[in-house]
Amino acid sequence: MSVETEPTADSEQTVEDLATQLGEAITEMPAYEEFLDKKEAVEADEEAQEQIEEFEQIREEYMLARQTGQADEDDLRQLQDAQEELHSIPVMSEFLQAQNDLELRLQALNEHISEPLAVDFGEKAGGCCND
């Protein structure tokens, strides 16, 4: 039979220390290092940066048109085409793959952390229950 006790300052500090250690360990994971390398490559690639700016402009225009009820199929198609063109740049494609790999790894870590908890650690714990 376990007895529940109030957390002590020492136990809370231990949890904080462990969280810091986890964060530091994540920064040393190959998936994280690969993500950073690919991110830096995208940031340094002039073509990718131009395509990102163009995509962001088209996306903003689409969102504004959508909010005002003026967006149509051609606008959506233009946005999708710009996104496909951006994602087809090799450096961007490699970045997106590295980002996906890191997200999958972090999701697996979240599952390990959440296993003993009553809530999903990686999700926002709100004031209401989701059934």
Image (cartoon, rainbow, N blue to C red):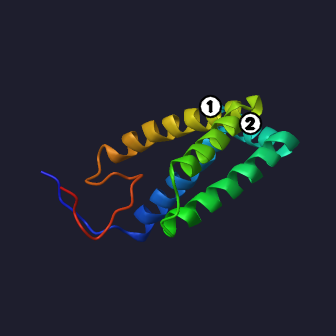
The answer to whether any part of residue 29 appears in the image is no
Q: Quadrant of residue 119?
A: bottom left
Please report the residue visible at 50 percent of the width from the left and 41 percent of the height from the top: 106
**Is 32 situated above or below 65?**
above
Q: Which residue is mark 1?
A: 97
**Quarter placement of the C terminus:** bottom left
Q: Earlier in the sequence, mark 2 or mark 1?
A: 2
Residue 112 placement (x, y as % from top left): 38, 40
Considering the numbered disc 2 on the image, is that residue within a helix, a strand or a loop?
A: helix
Considering the numbered disc 1 on the image, is that residue within a helix, a strand or a loop?
A: helix
Query: Which residue occupies the foreground of this view, 54 or 11?
Result: 54
Residue 46 placement (x, y as % from top left): 87, 43
The local crowd at label 1, few if under 14, some if 14 to 19, many if 20 or more residues have their Cα within 10 Å, is some
The local crowd at label 2, few if under 14, some if 14 to 19, many if 20 or more residues have their Cα within 10 Å, is many
Residue type for callout 2: Lys
Residue 111 placement (x, y as % from top left): 37, 41
Measure the alpha-carbon separation of dots 2 and 1. 9 Å
Please report the residue visible at 58 percent of the width from the left and 66 percent of the height from the top: 64
Q: Quadrant of residue 5?
A: bottom left
Q: Which mark is residue 60?
A: none
Q: Are marks 2 and 1 in contact (CB under 8 Å)?
A: yes
Residue type for callout 1: Gln
Please report the residue visible at 49 percent of the width from the left and 35 percent of the height from the top: 104
Q: Which residue is mark 2?
A: 38
The answer to whether any part of residue 61 appears in the image is yes
Please report the residue visible at 74 percent of the width from the left and 48 percent of the height from the top: 52
Query: Which residue occupies the foreground of this view, 46 or 116?
Result: 46
**Is 130 situated above or below 109?**
below
Count of marks, rendered view:
2
Query: Which residue occupies the foreground of this view, 105 or 90?
Result: 90
Residue 85 placement (x, y as % from top left): 69, 36
